[in-house]
Amino acid sequence: MRKGIYAAKTMAAVLAGTVIVTGCSGQTEKETVAQNSESQTENQTKDGEEIEKPEKITFMVDGTLVTKANGQEEWVERWEELMGIDLEIIQPDHTAYYDVLGQTMASGQDNWPDVMITTSQYYTNYAKEGVLWDMTEAWENSDVKKSGRVINDNVVNSLYIGDQLYGIPTGPGMGCITYIKKAWLDNVGLDVPTNYEEYIEVLDAFTNGDPDGNGIDGDTFGVSAAGFINAEAPYIQYLPEFWQDAYPTFYQKEDGTWADGFTEDSMKEAIKRLREAYEAGYIEKETLTNATSDCRNKFFEDKFGVFTYWPGSWQKRLSEGLETNGHDGELVPIKPIAEVGAYIDRTPVALCITSACENPEGVFKYFLESALDGGAVQELWTYGVEGVHWSKEAEEVCGITYEEGQFHMLESRDAPGTQYTKAFFAGDNPFVRFEEGKDIGEGSFDSMILESNELFNANSRPAQLPVSTDEMAQYNGDLTTLKYSIIADCVTQGVSVEEGMKRFEEEGGTQWSQMIVDSLNNQ
């Protein structure tokens, strides 16, 4: 048996974004890839039968794929040129993706796409409901798996449910790390915090002192986030220093039994920490209603100094955002404080084939597996289209001068002044490497990006894969809403933790929670 039932901590889920970028090749390679693609229909077999090449594939995806504003038409044109297949992209607004996905699934199989992208909660639920095609055999027998180019098998293994695989990852799951503005630390004379006491000391100085050096005490605050609790697993990643060992939903203990972390004493202590920091003004007052974009903008405007956000390319983007606004851009990504121990590496986002797909073997071979071919197609998924998303021409882009032949990202169409940073598959932190000499972006990534990824990878632990039962499907939506409301009231409205937990029992939370725990333990 694989280590597939990676237990769960489940609530609602929404994807976090990235931007797409680059990739193409010369005419000779284009023709070669197209010819190879055509000839594969003669050679690929399953149980002695030919795997038919699809004529058209529909793909439902969020804003992690290049948008129409950022050259999606050119991207699709290049993919169709490489593969000889019609491709239809269905791309709702990024923030509304899972609402639209749910409506699409509820509307009947005739409306389902061939391929869709899902996060962990939807992945396990849709697998249980029979929405997803079991691709276990296809992956185990795939050329990609046999190639030796898979960097970390655990990235794929984390998506196994029991012995079944229903999706392949878009890359490592990744999580968030805490950044502190170096200039602010210097201005208040403090070192990087290593424990909660030191962390609070930094927040106090950032809130009540003059960390931005404008001569005014108390016109800044310590930390902000997009909510006290995130809508997506692992939920606590934006304020880990306050949550520490607490977890707001269901998880599997080391002895294999299930529990609801919301009902444990660690949750009460976490809520108290959040409330105390909020009342002291260390946490921005608009945290409850912030979107991640609100936090980024306030961070760029030098309104707060500690921000827990994605590693890798996001460190560079945060730094550049500060500099664009006239502020010092040096950030210190810190190791988890002692009480946190490790950041949480979320379950990877998955590319899944729906059970309504008429030719799932063909879609797996010519859409999913081809995207990891180690050459021109993977280049497209990783970097985008030459002349649209990347270039090797001698030129200046966003104030940076590049020599002839030097690979670089081009300026974003919908975010002028910034360059594209990564693609659907992250070039700076892939889970399947290119074939030798085929990665056009090799050596082009900023050391800041690579070091940030390395810090996270070395100081993180994997999240458990959410597991669903009938009871969870029936009660967890209302239960989650109740939990979120209690947390918000306790932190922002002065409601005591004891009063909040009393409300949890009176409004059915205790009963719903126990029913779900029992169902998980009786699987």
Image: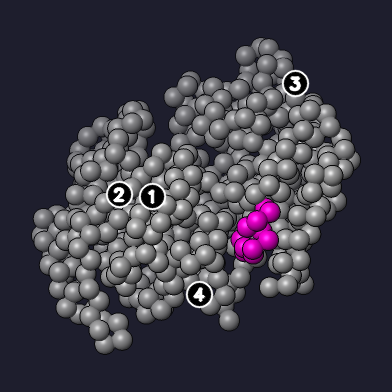
The extreme bottom residue here reads: 48
Looking at the rendered structure, the secondary structure element under dot 3 is helix
**Nearest to N terminus: mark 3 or mark 2:** 2
Q: Is residue 22 above or below residue 221?
A: below
Mark 1 or mark 3, whichever is nearer to me:
1
**Nearest to N terminus: mark 3 or mark 4:** 4
Instruction: Please indicate whether residue 338 sits to the left or right of residue 429 in the image.
Output: right
Whether tag 1 and tag 4 are in contact, CB under 8 A, the answer is: no
Label 1 crowding class (10 Å Cα cut-off): few <14, some 14-19, many 20+?
many
Q: CA distance from mark 2 to mark 4?
A: 27 Å
Whether tag 2 and tag 1 are in contact, CB under 8 A, the answer is: yes
Where in the figure is residue 340, as x and y percent of width and height? 73, 50
Label 4 crowding class (10 Å Cα cut-off): few <14, some 14-19, many 20+?
some
Instruction: Please indicate whether residue 256 sits to the left or right of residue 39 in the image.
Output: right
Please give the residue where the numbered disc 1 appears in the rendered image.
61
Where in the figure is residue 36, as x and y percent of width and height? 16, 69
**Nearest to N terminus: mark 1 or mark 4:** 1
**Nearest to N terminus: mark 2 or mark 4:** 2
Please give the residue where the numbered disc 2 appears in the rendered image.
89
Q: CA distance from mark 1 to mark 3?
A: 44 Å
Camera-side residue: 454 or 31?
31
Q: Amino acid at mark 1?
A: Val
Q: Which residues are magenta?
A: 466-476
Please give the residue where the numbered disc 3 appears in the rendered image.
208
Q: Amino acid at mark 3?
A: Asn
Q: Amino acid at mark 4?
A: Gln
The residue shown at (19%, 74%) is 40
Label 2 crowding class (10 Å Cα cut-off): few <14, some 14-19, many 20+?
many
